[in-house]
Amino acid sequence: MRVSVRTLVTVTLAACVASLVLQARGRSPASPQPALADLVLTNGRIVTVEDTQPEAQAIAINDDKITALGTSGAIQQYVGPNTKVIDLQGQLAIPGFIESHGHFTGVGESRLQLNLMTAKSWDDIVAMVAEAVKRAKPGEWIYGRGWHQEKWTSRPEPNVEGFPTHASLDRVSPDNPVVLVHASGHASFANAKAMELSGIRRPTESPRGGEILRDASGDATGLLREEATDLIKAGAGEPKRTADETLARERRVLELAAEESLSKGITTFEDAGSPLTTIDRMKQMVDEGKMGVRLWVMVRQPNAIIAPKLAQYRMIDYASGHLTVRAIKKQIDGALGSRGAWLLEPYTDKPGSTGLETTPIPEIEETARLAIQNGYQLCVHAIGDRANRETLDIFERTFKANPAKSDLRWRVEHAQHLSAQDIPRFGRLGVIASMQGVHCTSDGPYVTERLGAKRAEEGAYVWQKLIKSGATIANGTDAPVEDVNPIASYYSSVSRKLKDGSVFYPDQRMTRMEALRSYTINGAYAAFEETNRGSLKPGKYADITVLSKDILMVPEDQIPSAKVVYTIVGGRILYRLNRD
C-alpha cells in the first residue's frame, strides 16, 4: 500500500507531539504509566532535607511510602480518579517533626491535671488549687505540674531559697492532699496533708540523691528535690482503682499524648523512659491501629527488672515503623532550676552545693554492660558539667572494653552545661547530644546566676561548639517540662532570644537549616531510623508536616506564629488545622 507524503508527515508530527507531551509530564515515550498515587501534595514549597533533591513542588504517596517528588507538572502523572490531592497553595512542607526527647505519658497526664505553666506567681497557683478543691471530693488528691519559681514576677513570702512554704496551700486545701510537680520534673511541692499521708515528718531523713528542703527551724517546707519526690505516696487514702479503671486511664493518657503530639506536627515521638508495662500498653494500642504517632521508646526501670527481659522487648520498626524499643534510660543528676544538676564546682548562688548525683555510677555502668550486650543504646540524663563528664567517662570505658562494637550512637540527654575539655569528646566518641532548644531560652535568665558568667559562656547550650566537634544534635522539648510544640523550640534554636529581648550567647545559635535538621534527620539518626524517616525521599515513610508560614524564610520574629496545617503519618492525614 502506498502512503502519501502528506499522511507520512501528519503521522510523524503526531508522534513528535505525543513524545513532547510525555516528556513534559516527566516520562519518555517508552516509560510505563506509573502507579497512581493515593495522596498527592502539590503547589507547595517542599523542603526535603536531602542534598540530592533539596526542594520540590509536589510529592506523590502510595500506601505509607513516598513514591516521587518533583514539579507540580511532573507529579500530575500520578493523579488518578481515586487520588486525594491537596493544593498546598505555596505553603511549606517538611519532613515530619521528630520529638527527640519527651515524656509521652507525661504529655497525656498533663492534660488531666492542673497546668501551672502560665502561672505568674505563687499566689496564682494557690488560687488555682483553691478552685480545684471546690470541684474535688473530700480527701481526693489534687495534682498539678509546670510551676517554675524563676518565672514568677515576685518571690513568695515567706520563702526558703526562693521556694514557698506549704502553709499557704494548707489554708486553701486542709483536707485534700496536693502535689505540684516542678516544670523540670526534678522537684515537687506538697502540702501538709500530702506529707502526712506519705509519712514525711520532722525526723524523716532525705533519701540518697534527694533532699527534703527545710526551714530554719528544721521543718519541711513542702519542697522535695529529686529522689525525695519518691517519698510521696500519691493516692494514699483514696479508694483503689479497679483493674478496668486503671486500664481505661492508662489508655486515655496515651490517647491524649498522641492527640497533642499530632496537633503540634510531630510524627515520631522519642519517649525518654517508660516501664515495661507501659510499653506493653503502647504495643497493644499499636496493634489495634489506635496509635497514630510513631513511638521510639527508652526502657526505664531498675537493672534487675529489665535484665532478663531486654531481648524479649527489643523491637525495631515494629508495625510498619510505629514502635521501636532499643534504648535504655538512666539519670545521673537533676536539673539546674532546682539546683539538682551535678557540677564540677559549687553553684554560684549556693556555694555549699554542687548538686546531686541521683544514680550511683556503678549502677549506670551495669546498665551500660546490659545495653551493649543486648544491642541497646544507652541514654543518660546529664545536665551539669560533672554529670556530663562522668557519663562520657562511662561511655568511653564501655566502648574501650568492647572494641568489636561500633556505631553505637549512645546519647547524652540534655547535655546542657559542659566543661570546655569535654565538648570535643562528643564528636570523638560518636555520642549524640540530645538537647532541647527551648530549654536555652527558658533557663537563660537564671543560668548566669547559677553558674557565673565564665561557666555559662564556656559550656551552656553550646550548639555550635558541639557541631564543630562533629557531634549530632537532636532537638526536642522534654515535654511536659515545656510545651511539646516544635516550632517554639525551633525558634529558640535559631534566635536564643530571652523574654527581655536579649540574646543568650548569640554565637551559639543554629542556622535555620541546622535547626530543621536537628528536628528531622538528626532525630532519626539519633534513633537509627534515618533510612526510613527524617527526610523526604522515595521509599521513606510519608511522614510530612505542613506549616502555615515558611519558617526557613519569614522574618525571625514571625516564626513563633507559624501553625501546623497538616500532620501526615504514613500517608494518612492525622491532623488538619481547623481554620473556622
Image (tube, grey):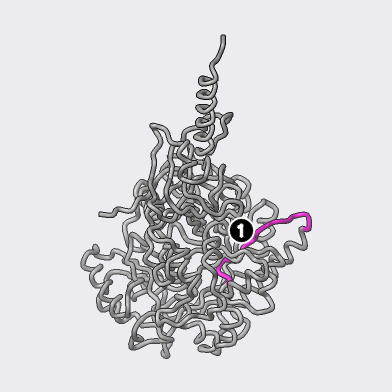
> Residue lying farthest left?
134
Residue 225 can be seen, yes or no: no
**Residue 433 found in image quarter:** bottom right
Q: Position of residue 198 (x, y in %)?
A: 40, 69
Closer to us: 59 or 99: 59
Front in this rendered view, residue 175 or 440: 440
Q: Give residue 497's quadrant in the image.
A: bottom left
- Quadrant location of the N terminus? top right
In the image, 82 versus 521, the foreground residue is 82
The three-letter code of the residue at mark 1 reads Asn
Q: Position of residue 291 (x, y in %)?
A: 43, 46
Q: Main secondary structure of the magenta part?
A: loop
Looking at the image, is 81 positioned above or below residue 190?
A: above
Category of crowding for the residue at label 1, using alpha-carbon neighbours closer than 10 angstroms: few (below 14), some (14–19), many (at least 20): some
Q: Please identify the quarter of the rendering in which residue 434 is found.
A: bottom right
Q: Do we see residue 74 in this rendering?
A: yes
Q: How far across and how far down the image is residue 340, in percent?
A: 52, 77
Position of the C terminus by quadrant: bottom left
In the image, residue 517 lies in the stretch drawn in magenta: no
**Magenta-highlighted residues:** 403-415
* Residue under label 1: 303
At x 41% / y 86%, what residue is drawn? 160
